[in-house]
Image: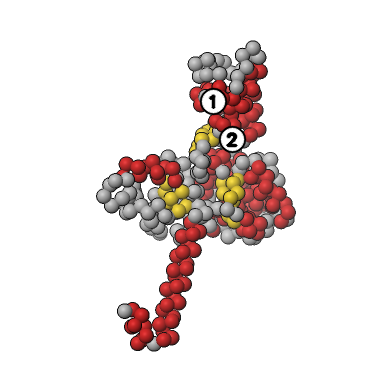
Amino acid sequence: MSHDDADDNAPYDNRHRAFLQALISHGILTLATAKPILAAIESAHAPSRPVLANDITDADLSNYLAQVHAAVAPFDMEVRAAYTQTEPRERVHALVNTSSDAPTQLATARRPDEIAYVKRLLDDMFERNNTPDRELCAVSGMQAARLHKADASGGRASVGGGSGGTAGGVAAGEAEAAAAAGAQSLSLREAEALLASLVAEGWLLFAADHYTLSARALMELRGWLLETYNEPADPDEDGPVVRVKECRACRDIVTVGQRCATRECLCRLHDHCARTYFRAQRDAAGGPRCPACRVPWTGKDFVGVRALRGAAGAAAGHRKSDGVASLRQRRGPAVAEQDSD
């Protein structure tokens, strides 16, 4: 099947219904995973003209996605696309609910105690493990296991907790129910099973002993994450609190990428966006600079698990400095003067 053979104006029919079922079943689709699905659908539709997976083009996939998007729009659903934040970079497509309470979008079929656990996991990702010194936006396997207890998280206990307020205009009754769910614990075995399920369903990624949100989860939870963890400027404070940051180039949320060396600067870039953005500055005098504050862009200040290396190095340097100062104090001013020479 080629794009030339495809009928862009074909009515929504059983082919598109079959593709929608596949999209729901898989959670997310890339061109590579969609090719055999579309080939099977087209071959079943016209058995006299069998289609091979390699015959499917990106344009064919786009046509199907557009048809499905138009069909589900009246039901507060839409087809969204995003790029994966880690290499190899892939464009992924997902069916997203645009109306319901966002945390339950992540775990619609879950029990209240499981939803409460997911909220604690998100709190640790975007509050406890997301500081100016260490912008991790992830949770280690050990941390995730500890969160099976309701009081283990240092973040907000429910959607309505914290100064960020109630996300998405959730009604008071729903906020109270979320708060009640926030007090529920899971057993360690239940938490481990839930984590494995969320990874298998494509909501979480697990690599380098850390859990992060997948492209699917970031697409589905985008609005809720921005509203829940970012806070507007307070008259008594210096400015807004921006915990969830967007890429300066593509405007998607950044949980894996690069950051400006200046802590106060909010500029963040995905790795592939940084490569593209700074390509034109490769030969510029002084090298690439932050597009926001114009300080030199190091490419060594990270968002994600790589930020642990920077934090560890800073801590080691601090310990080394303290150790030298302590040694000089013990050895006396004369020796300290020799060291300085």
The one nearer the camera, 116 or 319, is 319
The image shows residue 320, relative to residue 276, as above or below, that is below
Q: Position of residue 59 (x, y in %)?
A: 50, 24
Residue for point 46% across, 64% down: 313
- Scheme of colours in the image: secondary structure
Q: Residue 28: which numbered mark, if any? A: 2
Q: Position of residue 103 (x, y in %)?
A: 60, 44
The image shows residue 118, relative to residue 60, as above or below, that is below
The image shows residue 113, relative to residue 38, as above or below, that is below
Residue for point 32% across, 45% down: 282
Residue for point 63% across, 21% down: 41
Q: Where is residue 287 in the image (x, y as percent from the top left)?
A: 31, 50
Q: Is residue 117 visible in the rendered structure shown here? A: yes
Quick one: which residue is furthest to the top in this view?
48
Q: Quadrant of the N terminus?
A: top right
Tag 2's secondary structure? strand
**Number of numbered callouts drawn:** 2
Residue for point 65% across, 40% down: 201
Q: Quadrant of the C terminus?
A: bottom left
* Mark pair 1, 2: CA separation: 13 Å
Q: Residue 202: which numbered mark, if any? A: none
Q: Disc 1 designates what residue?
A: 61
